[in-house]
Amino acid sequence: SAKVIWPDSYQENWTLRRLSIGPVEVEKARAAVLKKYPDFVTHYSSKYNSSNSWSAFSLRSYGGAPDFIMKPEEMPKEWKRRNPEKLLWELKDTSKRKMLPEFEPLINAVTGVKHRIRIMRLVAGGCIERHSDVIDRETGTVAAKTLRIHLPIATNAKVRFTSWDLSGRRQSVRMREGEFWYVDTRKPHQVDNEGDTDRLHLVMDVVSCPELLSAIERAKKVSESL
């Protein structure tokens, strides 16, 4: 896999942290998804989605299609060779964003310019196997990079998000509904849903900015106490 060169910033050591924003009300958004139930697309990473339990659809995507959930720049060389036109696609809101206005207050609760915005599902009994997304060079906490923010809108007590920091130290947390979390996806992580209900997350890639970094920084004591 590609080698990550870590900038000289303590913020780059953040691995899995709850933001000081919220918690927010997610009931309306959850009800809207369950009622309208747009088509979910099986996640393209078959290596880490071996049971096909991980799926998503886009509210904002490259090219503007709700069923296009990937980021062209982070795809393998062979995919890029076969899809050169997709590398030029720009970020656009999808038709599903208009269909689900209940998500706007949740999206706007996090400051910063939004890139991809997806609803991601992990079915009951499903697993996203341990992996790291080091191929995406636009990820990070430094200026102009993007941070991955998760907001559970439906979950259960038996969902666990596990991540490993640069020293190999393991951190496993339960992300509760209405809580915003920062996940450094360049570091190894996995998700297990051992419950009886599906897990639904709003997942946003947000451009790094002082206000967002501050919301993560202020949550230091909260995250370390978990």
Image (cartoon, rainbow, N blue to C red):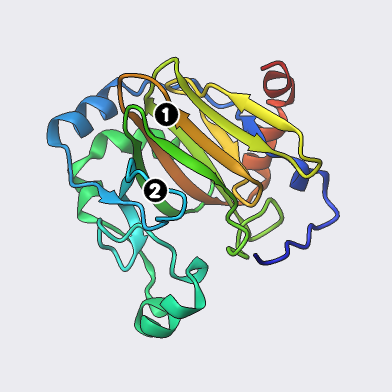
Residue 102 horizontal/vertical position (percent): 26, 33
Residue 210 horizontal/vertical position (percent): 68, 45
149 in relation to 157, above or below: below
Q: Which of the image's four quarters has the N terminus?
A: bottom right
Residue at left offset 53%, top offset 50%: 206
Task: Answer yes or no: is residue 132 visible.
Answer: yes
Residue 153 horizontal/vertical position (percent): 36, 27
Q: Which of the image's four quarters has the C terminus?
A: top right
Residue 124 horizontal/vertical position (percent): 32, 27
Can you tell which quarter of the image residue 8 is in?
A: bottom right
61 or 143: nearer the viewer: 61
**Alpha-carbon neighbours of circle 1 within 10 Å: few (<14), some, or many (≥20)?**
many
Whether residue 191 sits left or right of residue 91 in the image: it is right
54 or 67: nearer the viewer: 54
50 in relation to 222, above or below: below
Residue at left offset 50%, top offset 50%: 205
**Alpha-carbon neighbours of circle 2 within 10 Å: few (<14), some, or many (≥20)?**
some
Can you tell which quarter of the image residue 36 is in?
A: top left
Residue at the limit of the structure toward the right, as seen here: 8
**Cα distance between the residues tagged 1 and 2:** 23 Å
Q: Secondary structure at mark 1?
A: strand
Q: Earlier in the sequence, mark 1 or mark 2?
A: 2
Residue at left offset 22%, top offset 34%: 33
Whether residue 33 sits left or right of residue 166 in the image: it is left
Q: Amino acid at mark 2?
A: Ser
Task: Answer yes or no: is residue 111 visible.
Answer: no
The numbered disc on residue 190 is none
Residue at left offset 21%, top offset 25%: 31
The residue to which callout 2 is attached is 50
The residue to which callout 1 is attached is 152
Q: Amino acid at mark 1?
A: Pro
